[in-house]
Structures are given as C-alpha cells and as structure tokens.
Image: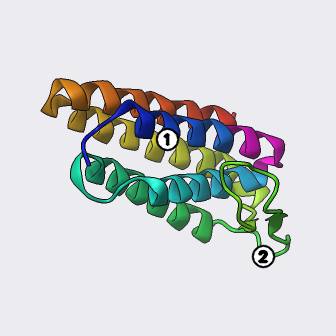
Amino acid sequence: MTLNPVVTQAVLRDFDAIRAECAKSDQIYRPDCIRQGLELTSRRIPFHGDYGAMRQTLRQTSMEIASEVSSKKDPNRDRLEIDPDTNVRFRSRRYYTPVKISEMTTVKTRVSAALDACQSRLLKLADRSTSWNKNYTVVAVGVSRLSSVLR
C-alpha cells in the first residue's frame, strides 16, 4: 500500500483517542495505556508497502514501553479495566497495569525517551521521499504529543 492521507489521518485520530483515554486514568496506569494504544494503532496500519516501516516502529516502541512497565509494575494494585465502549476508536476490553508510585519518575522518563526515539526513527524514515516526508513527519508529531499525557 502506498502512503495516503486517509490512512495517515486515521493514525492521528487513533493517537488523539489514546491521549484522551490515557488522560482520564490515574498516573500509574498511563504508561501502559500509551503502550497499548501504540500496539492497537500499529495493528491497524497496513503491514506491507510504504506503511510497513511505520507499523514496525510503533510496535517496537510499544515493546520497549512494555518492558519498562513490566519491570516496574505494582503487584499490590489491581489492573485498571477499560470497558469496550469507552473509546470509539478501540472497541475492545483492555486492562492497564499499574506502575509503582515510587518508580513513576523513572518510568515517565524512560517512556518519554522511548517516544522520543520513536519520533526520531519516524523522522529518519521520512527522508526517503517527499511523500514519506509528508506522512511520516505528521505521524512523528502525533507520537510526540503522546508524551504530554505523562506530565
């Protein structure tokens, strides 16, 4: 599949839905919310053609964040259950893993770093052509806006 504004705008709408959903949850659940949002968004992106590298980059970032959340999870708190009708973009039941409050500063820093690295990889891929520049840059900006949820 070649790059087109319809698919790229769908990715941005997914990011907006992720930001809105994560902002409603407690701070300790937000890193995992971002992780799952990136994963769900990547699943909707075509895996072949010009979108393959974008999909892979988002999946890689999701895995990096998953590793951080997993290593700092709070076993004394329950996971947060999100009902399927909470987010119109992602109609599935989700569970967010809590992070230890004492580790939040470290987790926020590392998740922000992972999102920054994702943005950098997308911008590097954008150098391939004018079309890639237009679409990948827009998505990179969308990724950078996700980190605002961590503040």
Extreme residue toward the bottom, this view:
75
User: What's the CA distance linking mark 1 and mark 2?
Assistant: 33 Å
Give above or below for 137 relative to 63: above
- For mark 1, what is the residue? 11
Give above or below for 140 relative to 14: above
User: How is the protein colored in the picture?
Assistant: rainbow
**Bounds of the magenta segment:** 19-27
Residue count near mark 1 (Cα–Cα under 10 Å), binned few <14, some 14–19, many ≥20: many
- Whole-percent x and y of residue 135? 33, 30
Is residue 23 on the magenta stretch? yes
Q: State the residue at coordinates (52%, 52%).
A: 41
Q: State the residue at coordinates (81%, 53%).
A: 86
Q: Main secondary structure of the magenta part?
A: helix
What amino acid type is highlighted by mark number 1? Val
Can you tell which quarter of the image residue 91 is in? bottom right
Can you tell which quarter of the image residue 84 is in? bottom right
